[in-house]
Amino acid sequence: MEFDLIALIRERCARPRGDVVLGMGDDAALLEVPAGQQLVASADTLVAGVHFPPQTAPGDIGWKSLAVNLSDLAAMGAQPAWVMLALTLPRADGDFVERFAEGFTELAGKHDVALVGGDTTQGPLSVTVSAFGFVPAGQALRRSGARVGDAVFVTGALGDAAAALRLMRDAGFGTRNSMNEQTWAELQARLNRPEPRISAGLALRRVASACIDVSDGLLADLEHVCEASGVGAVIEAGALPISAALKGTFAPEQCRDYALCGGDDYELCFTASETDASRIEEALARTECKITRIGRIVAESGVRARDAHGGTLEPPRRGWQHFAP
Ligand code: ADP
Ligand code: MG
């Protein structure tokens, strides 16, 4: 059974790449790292009921399990190359694997990523992907480079995924009933099929001073940048990029709270000196990715969100944390 599933995964997911000397099928993969490049490696686990609602479509789970990992590579400024997939399934469910593979390979194809190995086990539904990419030696983006006076930017729009999750739960059902189909589909797609900001990450090499992907919520993730850099940040709440779908569904303060604290956005939050800020705006204009300047790095530690009158906002919670009391 296990071997049938592995064969099915291989049939549906394996994609060729010139730098894969030996892919799925042996005890381990053999891979060729290009000269002068550093290998960038990351792993993320999605557990049913924790990272996605149990009713999530298998194709969406496939897409998202890869997307969250490619997002980590994007945040490092890396070009993705290879992934490994550790799949834990309650039973040998070929139908699930086929539909999972559809979402997984759709995204893998977009970024020319090859599945080179993994593991298949029985247990509660859980997906762990490890992703590997390249960056020219010394050019990786890190969390630790933000300096006082730098501008803070974010790609895309914030808060959609958290809003969609809320609407899927009972509390949001009334609102969802009154929404138009298109808006609901847009918000749901942002939760289930996030687009890793690979081209933005590549364009930010050597110009951004620090970078992180927003997975737990803007305030929480920017806090990580600030801690690693020994600085603080002030965010102008009025500048936060909010999608038309979110704006059309919730009151302005709710949109703002989703944008500040909601998780699962997988946008990039990055910093740049004032002189590099204009170079960044130019470089990103050549990609499809919109960016918005949302604040500034300051000496005083902590991340503060300000309203239009300069008052400090106190959102209900700062971000998602496992093992929270
Ligand atoms: P081993 O017992 O040596 O770990 P497995 O039977 O687990 O071997 O795996 C056989 C081959 O299939 C290996 O190359 C492994 O990397 C690959 N593989 C197993 N499960 C997966 C999966 N879910 N996705 C991709 N490759 C997999
Ligand atoms: Mg194994």
Image: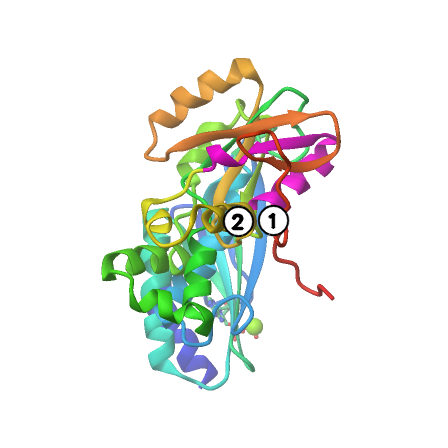
Residue found at x 46% / y 70%: 171
Sequence-earlier tag: 1 or 2 = 2
Residue found at x 44% / y 57%: 163
Report which residue position mark 1 lands on: 315
Ligand 2 is found in the corner quadrant, namely: bottom right
Q: Position of residue 153 (x, y in %)?
A: 51, 31
Colour setup of the view: rainbow
Q: Nearer the viewer, residue 92 or 312?
A: 312
Helix, strand or loop status at disc 2: helix
Give the crowd class for mark 2: few <14, some 14-19, many >=20 residues within 10 Å: many
Q: Amino acid at mark 2?
A: Asp
Residue 188 lies left or right of residue 28; in this view the side is left
Q: Position of residue 295 (x, y in %)?
A: 56, 29
Magenta span covers which residues? 218-240
Q: Amino acid at mark 1?
A: Pro
* Magenta span: chief secondary structure: helix
Q: Position of residue 40 (x, y in %)?
A: 57, 43
Q: Is residue 140 above or below residue 313?
A: above
Q: Residue furthest top?
A: 275
Cβ atoms under marks 1 and 2 closer than 8 Å: yes
Give the crowd class for mark 1: few <14, some 14-19, many >=20 residues within 10 Å: some
Is residue 229 covered in magenta? Answer: yes
To which quarter of the image does residue 232 belong? top right
To which quarter of the image does residue 284 belong? top left
Residue 280 lies left or right of residue 247; in this view the side is right
Residue found at x 61% / y 49%: 315
Query: Label 2 CB, ligand 1: below 8 Å?
Result: no
Q: Is residue 192 above or below residue 35?
A: below
Q: Is residue 33 in view?
A: no
Q: Nearer the viewer, residue 212 or 171?
A: 171
Which quarter of the image is occupied by the N terminus? bottom left
Report which residue position mark 2 lands on: 257
